[in-house]
Amino acid sequence: MDDVSRPVSPVLAEDALLGLLLPIWQLLIGAFVLFAVLVSIGRLARRGPSRMSTALLITAAAIAGFALVGVLLQG
């Protein structure tokens, strides 16, 4: 009888479950971030041009847009 040590393999069911849940968590986190960005843009825009310029609104929208495109292209 040989004493061959075999590597312990991970449980495949756990890996499959994590693989299914990962995109859901990414979408949930992305939705919360998008909501926070939209709320903050709204609050800052209501304060007037002295506190929030058009360039900052465009920059924030571009960042959110690039993040959204990145998430959509990843999946």
Image (cartoon, rainbow, N blue to C red):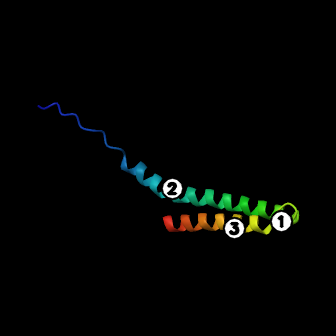
Q: CA distance from mark 3 to mark 2?
A: 28 Å
Left or right: 25 with respect to 53?
left
Which residue corresponds to the image point at 47% horizontal and 58% vertical from the top-left?
Answer: 20
Earlier residue among tags 3 and 2 = 2
- Mark 1 burial class by Cα count in 10 Å: few <14, some 14-19, many 20+: some
Residue labelled with disc 3 = 61
Q: CA distance from mark 2 to mark 1?
A: 36 Å
Please provide percent x and percent y for residue 52: 82, 63
Left or right: 11 with respect to 72?
left
Residue labelled with disc 2 = 21
Quadrant containing the N terminus in the rendered view:
top left
Q: Hey, what amino acid is under mark 1?
A: Ala
Q: Quadrant of residue 47?
A: bottom right
Which residue corresponds to the image point at 51% horizontal and 55% vertical from the top-left?
Answer: 22
Q: Quadrant of residue 40?
A: bottom right
Residue labelled with disc 1 = 45
- Mark 3 burial class by Cα count in 10 Å: few <14, some 14-19, many 20+: some
Count the labels in the image: 3
Say above or below: 53 vs 6. below
